[in-house]
Amino acid sequence: MRAGYGARAMIYATIGVLAIIAAFTSVEASGTEDSLQTLRAQPYGVVALWMIGIGLLGYMVWRVIAGIADVEDHGTDAKGIVARGGQVATGLIHAGIGVSVLSLAMGNGGSGGDSTQDWTAKLMSMPMGRYIVAVGALVLLGAGIYYCYKGWSGKYKEHLAASTFTTRFDPAIKGGLIVYGILLSLVALSIGIAALNADPSQAGGLGKALHTLRTQPYGPVLLGIAGVGLLGFALYNVVEAVFRIVPKVEGPDVETLAKAATG
């Protein structure tokens, strides 16, 4: 679990830094795949990719076990089953990303294409493919809205241990979750438009969402804010790696950030 959150932190910190650089230069903002390519070209970049890939596979193990064994006490009612099913699903998704990162570390990646467009095109070539893509876009939009809600409402505090660090950096964590939710929603909208028009080229990942921000009025400012927000989201993942509480391991009496805020 902690290795997985650490791996996610490394990914989004890289994307955030490159987005901030792009906000002040003519360099194009990078999505996940391009950012990992940039990371690979740095000293010890291949080592970092191996760490990220293995960490994401660890995250997959955690999410699958958490969903099956219900280590976070979601329960067995309808809401709990949906939450646990979501844990298993996100674990498998991160396994796919982890395998892709490890492939890049071994020098087998780097096609330079947009993986979101590639997957959208593959799905659209299947029977009922446009509808499958549309459903995926709706699910992703729901995830984006949930991240915004999670940040705005402070729901994330229920699973974090109270500490001086988590309290001090709580505003940055909140902002990071909201910005990430907005960017995820932009990705979902691009995929939804691609499904509506049956045009996979209109779909895009995080890189396209950042590019969309840059083309708006005050685009460099918006892109800079997005980059800072992604650093906040990376910080959130660092905090999750260090301070996340697992109820069936730590017990029910650990003081969470939510309890500290109300107490």
Image (spheres, rainbow, N blue to C red):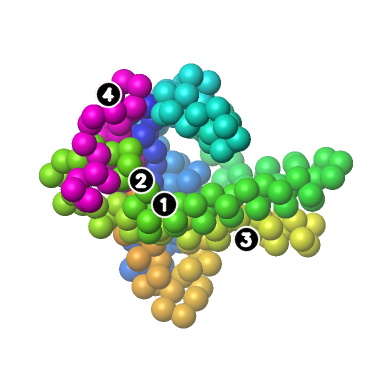
Magenta-colored span:
235-263
Q: Looking at the image, do the residues carrying marks 2 and 3 touch, with CB atoms under 8 Å apart? A: no
Q: Is residue 236 magenta?
A: yes
Q: Looking at the image, tell me whether mark 3 or mark 1 is earlier in sequence order.
A: 1
Q: Looking at the image, tell me whether mark 3 or mark 4 is earlier in sequence order.
A: 3
Percent of width and height locating residue 114: 60, 49
Residue 9 vertical placement versus 18 (above, below): above
Graded by Cα atoms within 10 Å as few (under 14), some (14 to 19) or many (20 or more), the crowding at tag 4 reads few
Label annotation for residue 189: 3
Pointer 4: what residue? 250
Q: Looking at the image, tell me whether mark 1 or mark 2 is earlier in sequence order.
A: 1
Q: Residue at position x 50%, y 29% from top?
A: 75
Q: CA distance from mark 4 to mark 1?
A: 23 Å
Quick check: 30 left or right of 16? right
Q: Looking at the image, tell me whether mark 4 or mark 1 is earlier in sequence order.
A: 1
- Looking at the rendered structure, the kind of residue marked 1 is Lys
Percent of width and height locating residue 58: 42, 23
Tag 3, which secondary structure?
A: helix
Q: Looking at the image, do the residues carrying marks 1 and 2 touch, with CB atoms under 8 Å apart? A: yes
Q: Residue at position x 31%, y 45% from top?
A: 157
Q: CA distance from mark 3 to mark 4?
A: 39 Å
Between residues 204 and 67, which one lies in front from this camera angle? Answer: 67
Pointer 1: what residue? 150
Residue 10 placement: quadrant: top left
Q: CA distance from mark 2 to mark 4?
A: 17 Å
Graded by Cα atoms within 10 Å as few (under 14), some (14 to 19) or many (20 or more), the crowding at tag 1 reads some
